Amino acid sequence: MIHEKNNLPQLRVEDRGNIRWLIVDNPSRLNAFTMAMWAALPRLIRKAEEDPEVRVIVLTGAGEKAFSAGADISEFETGRTAEKAAEYDALNNTAFEAVARCSKPTIAAIRGYCMGGGLELAICCDLRVASNTAQFSVPAAKLGIGYNPRWIRPLLAVVSPARARELLYTGRRYNADEAFAMGLVNSVHPSEKLTEAATVLANEIAANAPLSILAAKRAIDEFTLRPENPDISALDRYVDACFQSEDYIEGRRAFMEKRKPVFRGR
Ligand code: COA
C-alpha cells in the first residue's frame, strides 16, 4: 500500500512497505532543487529516521527525464550572488549532510539527468542504482561555480581522485555505463525495471538487522572521513549494541529454527 505524506509539492513522500520513497518532483525544471527544497530535505530525512517502520530510504526523481538537474539556476541571480554564495552553500550543505549522516540506509534510484547538486545528493546516498538512460555530470566549471570542498570528500569516497578530477575539470556528461565503470553507480538497469531493481535492493536490506547495518554504515563513514584517526571506540559501541540487541537473539534463533528472522531494530 502507498501512503502519501505530503510536505512540499516538489518533494513527495511515499511509503511502500518499510521503504520510504522521497520523490523529487519539479518537472518543469528537470527536478532541479529550489532553495525551499534544499531547506525541506533535512526535515524529511529526520522524519524518516524517527519513524520505526522505515527501514530504507530511496531517493528518486519523478518522471523519466531526470533524477535532478541540480540546483535551480533560475534562483542564482538573486539567491546565489557573490554575497549570498556562502549562505546558499550552507543551505545546500545541510541537505547533503542530512542525507550523508542519515542513520538509515539510503539508495538513489537515478533515471535521466543527474547533475551538479543532484549528483552530489546521489553521492551522499549509500548506494546508487541507475537506469540505462541516466546521465551524470558536475557542470560547476561550466557555470563558473566554485565547487564547495565539503562536497569533494563524499565524491572521493565513491570515485578515484583521477575520476573526480575528470568529472570536475571537464564538466562532461557521462552515460550510465561510463558511470558504472568508474564506480559511480552500483548497477545499471533498463529504465522500466529501475523501480523494481531499487525495490528489490531496498527490501533485501530492509529484511536485515537494522543495528548491524548501522554499525557497518558508521564504520564505513568513519574510515572514509578520518582514515588516519578513526574513533574505533565509538564504532565498537555500535557493535556492542548489536550483541546486546533482541535482534541478535532473534537472528540466531531463527537460524537454528530454520526460519526467516523478524528483526525489529532493537
Ligand atoms: N535549474 C533551473 N532550470 C533548469 C535546470 C536547472 N538546473 N535544468 C533544466 N532546467 C529547465 C530549463 O531551463 C528548461 O526550462 P524551459 O522549458 O522553461 O526553457 C527545462 O528545465 C528543460 O530543460 P532543457 O535545457 O530544455 O532540456 P534539455 O534536455 O535540452 O537539457 C540539461 C537538459 C540538463 C542538459 C540542461 O537543462 C542543463 O544543462 N541544465 C543545467 C544543469 C546544471 O548545470 N546543473 C547544475 C546546477 S549548479
Image (tube, grey):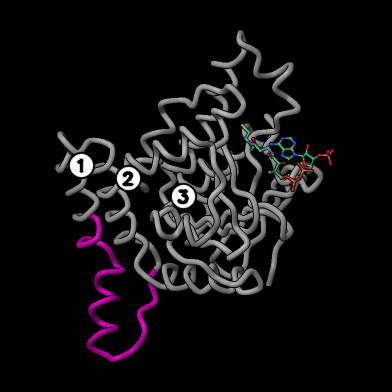
Give the Cα separation between the discs numbered 3 and 1.
Answer: 22 Å
Query: Element under label 3?
Result: loop
Q: Which residue is mark 3?
A: 125
Note whether ligand 1 is within 8 Å of mark 1. no
Give the Cα separation between the discs numbered 2 and 1.
Answer: 27 Å
Q: Nearer the viewer, mark 2 or mark 3?
A: 2
Query: Element under label 1?
Result: helix
Instruction: Describe residue 142's horizontal placement relative to residue 3 as left or right.
Output: left
Q: Earlier in the sequence, mark 2 or mark 3?
A: 3
Q: What amino acid is at disc 2?
A: Ser
Q: Which residue is mark 1?
A: 234
Task: Say if 218 sits above or below 202 in the image.
Answer: above
Find residue 250 and report its horizontal and vertical position in percent: 29, 75
Q: Quadrant of residue 80?
A: top right
Find residue 247 and report its horizontal and vertical position in percent: 31, 69
Query: Element under label 2?
Result: loop
Q: Nearer the viewer, mark 3 or mark 1?
A: 3
From the image, give the main secondary structure of the stretch colored magenta: helix
Find residue 201 and report its horizontal and vertical position in percent: 47, 70
Note whether ligand 1 is within 8 Å of mark 2. no
**Callout 3: 10 Å neighbours few (<14), some, many (20+)?**
many
Q: What amino acid is at disc 3?
A: Cys
Task: Say if 236 sits above or below 263 in the image.
Answer: above
Q: Earlier in the sequence, mark 2 or mark 1?
A: 2
Q: Which residue is mark 2?
A: 160
The quadrant of the image that shows the N terminus is: bottom right
Residue at (24% x, 51% y) in the render: 238
State the extent of the magenta-drawn residues as a range. 241-263
